[in-house]
Amino acid sequence: MIYKHNEDKKELKELQDLVFIQPSDQPISFEKISFEAMDVFLLTPEYTASRGYNSYAFGIDKKSGEAFAITFKNAEKVSTPVNKSEKLVVTTKNTEGQGDTLITEYTFNKDSKQFVTE
């Protein structure tokens, strides 16, 4: 994953063994979730059998313009997250049990560049 801004390029993360199926060779669009201090971009390249979608998150600091890969702490099941009161809220369906809906709230730790569950 390479972040390009003007003439500057920065490798954020190496993604190996991914399958992308799309109608053209055009650049891939990202889902964007805006927070007060940063924009978060999600890449969801493929469906992974009974585990749902495997997503990758990247952030761009609104003040400095720094781009970075974001990791999740305690995120076993991932769906499309949203920003709710400056927290990343992930709602998932538990496919291993009775189909219960699970809601997890993450707060961003800028130092570790992780979304951490509360």
Image (spheres, grey):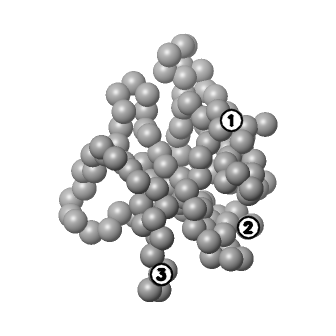
Residue at 66% from the left image edge and 69% from the top image edge: 61
- Residue 67 quadrant: bottom right
Taking depth in this image into account, of 56 and 93 the one nearest to the observer is 56
Image coordinates for residue 60, horizontal then vertical, percent:
60, 68
Using the image as rendered, state which of residue 61 and residue 103 is in the foreground: 61
Residue 79 visible here: yes
Residue highlighted by disc 3: 8
Q: Position of residue 109 (x, y in %)?
A: 75, 52
Of labels 3 and 1, the one closer to you: 3
Q: Are marks 3 and 1 in contact (CB under 8 Å)?
A: no
Measure the alpha-carbon separation of dots 3 and 1: 36 Å
Tag 2 residue: 37
Relative to residue 28, is residue 42 depicted above or below? Answer: above
Picture quadrant of residue 94: top right
Q: Tell me the quadrant of the picture where the C terminus can be found.
A: top right
**Quarter that holds the N terminus:** bottom left
SS under mark 2: loop
Q: Residue at x 74, y 56 (%)?
A: 111
Circle 1: residue type:
Thr
Instruction: Please determine whether, in this image, residue 10 is positioned above or below residue 1.
Output: below
Vertical placement of residue 104 versus 66, above or below: above
Label 1 belongs to which residue? 104
